[in-house]
Each structure stands twice: as C-alpha cells, then as structure tokens.
Image: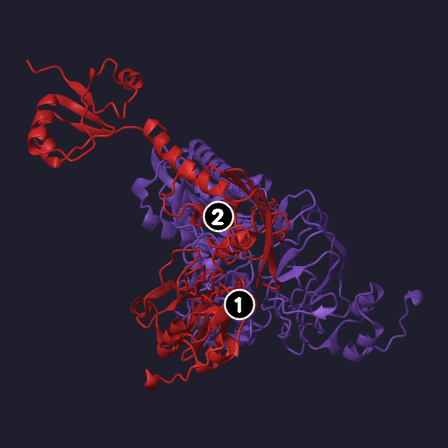
Chain colours: A purple, B red
Amino acid sequence: MARKGLDAITLEVLWSRLIAIAEEAATEVARTAFSTTVRESKNFALVILDPRGHSIAQSSATMPSFVGAIPLTARHLLKAFPLEVWVQDDLVLVNDPWISTSHLQDVSSLSPVFYKKNLIAFVGITTHVTDMGGKLRSPEVREIYEEGLQLPPCKFLNAGKVNQDILRIIRQNVRVPDQVEGDLISHVSASKLAARRIQEMMEEYRLRDLDQVASTIFQRSENAMREAIKKVPDGEYRFQVSTDGYDEPLVIRVEVRVRGSSILVDYTGSSPQVDRGLNATLNYVYAYSAYSLKCLFCPAVPNNEGNYRPVTVSAPEGSILNPRYPAPVNGRSMVGHFIPSAIFGALCKAVPELVQAASGSPTWAINAAGIAKDNRRFAGNFFLNGGQGASNEHDGRACLCFPSNTSATPIEVLEHMVPLLVERKAVIRDSGGAGEFCGGDGQQVIVKSLSDSPILLTFLSERTRHPAYGLFGGRNGRVGKVTLNGRPINPKRQWVMHPGDRLVLEVPSGGGYGDPKKRRRDLIERDLREGLLSLQKARTEYNYDGDFSVSSL
Amino acid sequence: MPARRWVAVTATADFPVALAPVKEALAGVAPVRTVPLPFRPLGRAEEATFAKKLQGAEGILLRPGYVTPSLLDQLPALKAVAVHGAGVDQVDVTIFQRSENAMREAIKKVPDGEYRFQVSTDGYDEPLVIRVEVRVRGSSILVDYTGSSPQVDRGLNATLNYVYAYSAYSLKCLFCPAVPNNEGNYRPVTVSAPEGSILNPRYPAPVNGRSMVGHFIPSAIFGALCKAVPELVQAASGSPTWAINAAGIAKDNRRFAGNFFLNGGQGASNEHDGRACLCFPSNTSATPIEVLEHMVPLLVERKAVIRDSGGAGEFCGGDGQQVIVKSLSDSPILLTFLSERTRHPAYGLFGGRNGRVGKVTLNGRPINPKRQWVMHPGDRLVLEVPSGGGYGDPKKRRRDLIERDLREGLLSLQKARTEYNYDGDFSVSSL
C-alpha cells in the first residue's frame, strides 16, 4: 500500500480478517485438543501478536485471564528467545506462572509467523491442560514444587521437529499423558493454521508486514478506551472484598485512581501471600484488572494492545496478588476471580449504570482422579458456575461464568470420563440476591461415585462464607456449600470419595441490583410461574401481594 | 616413509582375548598384533622391553595389561588406549562363577524347606504387613512375598527392583559376607512379589517412602531363617533410616531444602551387641550437626543416645537416639519425616527383648510423622529414633558387659536389676 494512512474500509477489512483468523485458529484448538477443559469448557485463548509481543487480535469466546496475560508471556519469552533466534515452525512452551498465566496447568506457547523471510507476527496460545502432575489441584499445597511439572521456556518445536525429550518428560509427569500430548499438539496445529492464514492475507492484500495495520488498530482502540475513561470524574475509588481463604479470610483491597484518560489500579493493602495455593501472579491480576475495565468502559471494541495502554496495574510484591516464587498458585482463580467485583465495587458510585453486583464466582470445579473399572487411569476437571451478579436493567443469569468464560462441563461428558453419576443438577430456587434486578441463581449438583475404588477429589470453591454482594439496595447472594455423605467438608482440602459416596455441591449465587421493592410485578410473577421464586420470598422480599398460585395462571 | 600403523592387543595366556572380532572391527584400518603385557607391576627393565615391543603402535586394546604413564611416555605414536569388553568375557565368567559357587556352597548348608515370617509396619493409617516365605532347595533360594499388603495410595510402596535389591542383600549378608558382591551372588536367588502389592506396586502408585517398607525386608528374611541359621541372623534393627526433610526460606531470602538422616539402633546378633545409632540395612551416614545447622536454620539442641533403649538380651540391641531441634527461622519451615516403628518395635530373638519404639513430638505434642507439618519460628521438635532388638536370654549376659554398660551410663541400675538380674552393688564411684 502506497498510501500514508489506512482508509477506514481497508482497516475494517484487515482488522476483521485478523480477528477471523484468530477465531478460526481457536476453533482448531478446541477441535483438536483432547481434554475436556479445552474441548468442552473452552478453557484456552489464542492471540495474534506483533513482533514486540503486543496483542493485535484475539479469539473471542475464550478466557479473559489468558488473553490478557498472553502479551505479557510473549514479552517474557522474547527476552529468553530474542527475535533473531526464531525460525519457521518453532514453538516455545512455558508454564512458569510468573511468565505464563498463573498456574502450572496453563501451558502457553509462542510461535513465529514468517512472510517472505521476515518475522511479521507471533501466535500465542494458552490452554488449561487436564493435568500437570503433582498433587491433585488443591490449595492445600504449601509450595509450587507440589503442584507439578514446571516448564521453563523451552523449544518444544524446533523448526517443525518435536523435541521428543521434552515430550517424554511431560508424558512421564502427568496422569493422563495422551490427553496432555493431544492438547500440546493442538497448539502446533492451530499455530500453523494461523500462520498460513496470515500469510494468505499478506499475499492477497500485497502487504509486507503488519506494522501499519497493528499501529492503526492500537491507536483507534486506545482512543475509544480513553474517551470512555475521560467521562469518569478524576478521583481515587476504593473498595475491599473478602474471600473464604484457606484457614482465614483473605482481603483484596483496591484503589482505582482515575486521572484524565488513564487509570491506575493499585492493590496495596491486600493480604500478604499465603503458603497455600491461593496466590495469583501479577500477569493474572493484570489480565483480570484490564478485563474488568474493558468490560466497563469499552465493551464493543475488539480487545487489543490499545485497550491496555491507558491501564496500569500495581500490586505489592509478596502479596496474594503478586507473590514471590516459589509460592503455590494452583487455586489462583479463587483470588483472581474476585478482582472484577473489587473494581466494580470501587467504581459503583462513579458509574452506577455500568457496574454489576458481585457474581457467585469464582468458577467452581470438581477435580477427580483415580482408576476406572477397566484399569484405565482417569483425571479430569469439571466446571460448574454460580449465578451472575445483577446490573442496571439486567437480572444476573443463573449458573453463568463470570468473570471467567469457562463453560460448564456437560453431564454426559463428565459421566463418560469418570465413574461418577450426576444424580441431580438443578438451579437453586430463591438463591439469587433479591433486587430490582435480581442476582443469578446458583445450582445444586449431587454426584455419586460408581467406582469400585477410591476417587481422589479436590475442588475449586469459594464464597462458602463470603456471599456475593448486592448493590444499591440489592441483596447479597446465597453462599455455597459442599457436603460429602451429608457432612459439610472443607472444600479447600483433598478428599477421597469411596465407592457409593455422595457429594453435594451448592454453588453460590449472584448479588441483586437496586431495591427489591421496585421490582416489576410481571417479572416477579414470571419467576413465580417458572418456579424460580417461592411465594414466601415474593411476599417478604418483594412485598408481592398478589394471590398467585400455579393453577391460577 | 613412516612405519605402517598397527594396534596392540595385550592379551596373555591367562586372560586370552578372542582376536577375530577385534580384527574384524579394525579390518582395513590397521593390523592387529598380540603383545602379552601382564597384569602386574612391571620393573623398569621389563617396562623398557614392552615399550620396545609396543613401539609404533597407534592403539592399545587393554585386557588386562599393566600400563603406566612412564610406559606410555615411551610410545610417541600412540593415539588411543581402549579397555576391552563391557560384556561377559572369560574373565567376567570366572568372577561370576567363583562368587556363585561360594554363595551356593553356603546355601547348601541350610536344610531344604519353606521358612515363613511376617513383620508389621506402622503404615499410614493402618499397619502394613510384609509376609515372606523363603524357600530353600539345594543351593537355590526363592524369596516370595505372597500375602503382603496390597499396594496403598500413600507413598509407602516399594517397586520390585528395590525389593529384589534388599532381598538379595539380606541373603548375601547371611551366607556370603566375605566375597565381593557381583552377579554371581545373585544367581542362586529368585525374588517374587505379587503385582499390586506394596512390594510390587502398579504405576502410578506413589513410592517416595519406599524405604519405610523396604527396610523391613532384612528383618522379615532374618525372622524367617532364624531357626534354620540362628548363628547367622540378627534381631530387627530400629530401621528404616529416619530423616528430617526441611524446606523454606532463610533470612537472606535464600531457599533451602535438605534431607537429614538419623539412625536407630542395630539389632543384636550371635556374639555381638547391636551398635547404637547405626544404619541397617541401608548404609546412610548420619548427617553431621554442623552440616545440618549450616544448611538450614535449625538448631540441634540435643543429640544423645537414649539410655536403656536397646532391647535387652544376652547380646543387647543397639540404642536409639533422641534429637531435639529448634527453629531459628523467621518464617515457617515445611517439615516431613522418614520415620517408622512408632508403634511396631524391632523384634528381639531367642529370648532377647524388643527394642523401644520411636516418637515424634512438636512443641511437646505427639504428631503423626507420616504427614506434612509446618514448624513455626521458635518451635521445638523432638525425635526419638527406635532401637534394635536383643539376642538371647538377658539372664545370660556376661556380668562384665553389664558393668561396662552401667559404667558408661548406657544402662540404668534399675534395668540391670530387673532385666539382667544383676545383683552387684554398682555405683559410679565404686569403679
């Protein structure tokens, strides 16, 4: 292109094309990965980056924590592997949480895209593999060494050739080597696909590099983000949320400092790092902080480097939000998923119409491992979501993942992978926080072991003591609970499920938004009709005085 | 024109080398000649003779031959010296055969039969059982662990390689202690353990505490054979080797992690008291206090033999030890242990008494040492490592040995009276 700037139409075409390439390659990841975490729960992300490691385009329906961290990972890897050492069909792997996303099961890769012998882009992928060895994922651990195999940056693919030594080391260290290998190879095939599609685009539009496209995309997105931030009055907005923690509650304290079109998110005052797996590395904290602000201020513009530029994130070293190596980190979502509710809480007075009450997050999960009847080893993570927080004009959705984008693991898949029977999976009536807009309901899941042998069990779970807050008169959500054979258990520990044992999980619900007394009568009656609301709660919380009965409608 | 290069093979009549494969390997490279360099120190004159014979050789294939730097100095053309034979050649065969013969001769003296025994360990939640049948047939022995506990989902499983090693070692100690150990000693021994048991677990069973099972193997085999060869066996020892594993962050922000071994008392045997704090069946040396204190922020406040702890007997079991450790760290220290025999003492033999069981306390409270613990700043840890079992009736113990132990403070007068029927009027000042 001879022109100085890009015209709007060409920009839109190339921008959309790059996003489409990221989407197609992401589909390749989901279609070729072996584990349910990727296949079913979409626990991965793919980002196209410029040669400096800045995000140009990303897959959409994937993990916020991954899309936000991949550029940081890329920049770390470019220090270990500077531009001149890359050749066609290289692929570097890493799962170091201080370089990658935040725990060892998140395996990240970076591979170069060459066009006419020039390195024009990188493809970054992070997938949450089923297993990385170590103790079955539980915050019970004391050091990262217990959490499994740590992969420093290493060339898994050297000019197209798989390093068999690395592959053997990984296979030997994980419980389900075929699944993990399949997931890693999905990085290879998706990277290749993305590279090929980018090369085709270069050819088609006679481009030499992506520099101009990328810088235009960054500038436009940055402008949009800054315009939105400018509307927020300058000031320091503070909030604090508490989590169940392991033995004691943990605190996330945030100060959101708005100055003109820039925002600093500062976590000074948050709990010191703990010697349990409840620490989140700074990459992860950055990703969720940037994501929260993106959701608030600029939800419509595709995400990229430009959206990150106005945002700075800081957390004291040695805190749960910026721990020192070798802190254990496997349950980092049980801290990091609280970040949006902390930021929304801080900004709720400044932008009440944009924020959302707290959700019944973090994403819950059952991690199970053992030996099946056919002597096959199994290990799997099965996700289940609490209720979303309500917002201005919107009820929270029941059982919807926020802030993560993890899909619930279908019952069929769970029962196929592990010898567990799901006896019940149901929305918990009346559980969402009451409000003019009510919080999303949580769910109850009852699972029975069909195995002949013990099953190792750990959980991701939180908000068993600290409910999701409601906003502006909206009520808090319901807290969660885990019982094994009727006895409440501490879900942060590892448990063994014996043949015939029965597990009940009650996943927390979201907070409401606005005064329940203002809730529209037709919505109350809809919920009554659908069985999501009891007449008793309608009377006491919503002052409903109708003479409702199922037969009367 | 330089002389044609060649390679020397230093075979002798005693230790011949099959030349055909060597010649084949070097075909088209260099001719091969035999120079019978003997395997013994050479005198100066002899060395000069061989230097002359080896003159011009570019390579020497040694098997065996006595090559010294002063000999090599005289061979300017020499480029390579290789040692012959990693495989089984005639010399190896001789070593194996001699060792095998010695082992078989000893086994032949044991009456044919099935000898059974069973030992129990503390295990993790519940005791584990090692059941052994030692089947002697002529000059061969089968060690069979059928009936031992099924594998457990805790790190208390020992893979078959380890079980084989300790089984063969136990029999070697019994029957052939003087001959250097090699393949020949293994040949008469077969070891079998049911797949899926603690002594032959299936992957991916956890195995990190395998010594807490495997170190019981000698006591199981000795127990089985104690009637057949009473003069050779040893009462059970205060094994397995104990250890403190500690990890954390030191004051200078340096990470530390270390294993520190400490041993219980050896079991007594015929004519021998067990030694205090001696590692058996492993050969792990105790970690010196200086080394431990240098590596980790722990202070060893006390490390002492536990008086009266060895099992009484005509020959008494080795004493255990008490170790008191205090944390000097500012930050928590992660702590795990290798420990056993906190409920199952080392057995005594032929009237000898059992040893004393071990114990671990943290700040005065007994803890389960199979679990992970955290030692906070200032915390105090006490380990009492078990002692060995005695051998023979304590009433038969020699009076001078009883008095020696009294004198050395290893035996209390009270135990001397009750266990050994000692009726002397001992007091430290009276000796």
Could you say which quadrant of the image residue A517 lies in?
bottom right
Taking the spot 64% from the left edge, 71% from the top edge, the residue there is A464
**Residue hosting label 1:** B354
Q: Is residue A529 left or right of residue B143?
A: right
Question: Are the residues at dot 2 and dot 1 in contact (C-beta closer than 8 Å)?
Answer: no
Q: Closer to the observer: label 2 or label 1?
A: 1
Q: Would residue B417 be visible to someone looking at this image?
A: yes
**Relative to residue A480, is residue A363 depicted above or below?**
above
Percent across and percent down for residue A149 are 46, 52
Q: Would residue A320 be visible to someone looking at this image?
A: no
- For the residues beneath circles 2 and 1, the answer to whether they share a chain is yes
Q: Which mark is residue A320?
A: none
Q: Nearer the viewer, residue A101 or A70?
A: A101
**Relative to residue B410, is residue B158 depicted above or below?**
above
Chain ID for label 2?
Answer: B
Between the residue at mark 2 and the residue at mark 1, the CA separation in whole angstroms equals 27 Å
Percent across and percent down for residue B122 are 57, 64
Residue type, numbered disc 2: Tyr
**Residue hosting label 2:** B162
Q: Residues within 10 Å of mark 2 (few under 14, many from 20)?
A: some
Taking the spot 15% from the left edge, 23% from the top edge, the residue there is B58
Q: Is residue A14 left or right of residue B21?
A: right
**Relative to residue A110, is residue B428 depicted above or below?**
below
Q: Is residue B244 left or right of residue B38?
A: right
Percent across and percent down for residue A201 are 46, 35
Chain ID for label 1?
Answer: B
Residue type, numbered disc 1: Asn
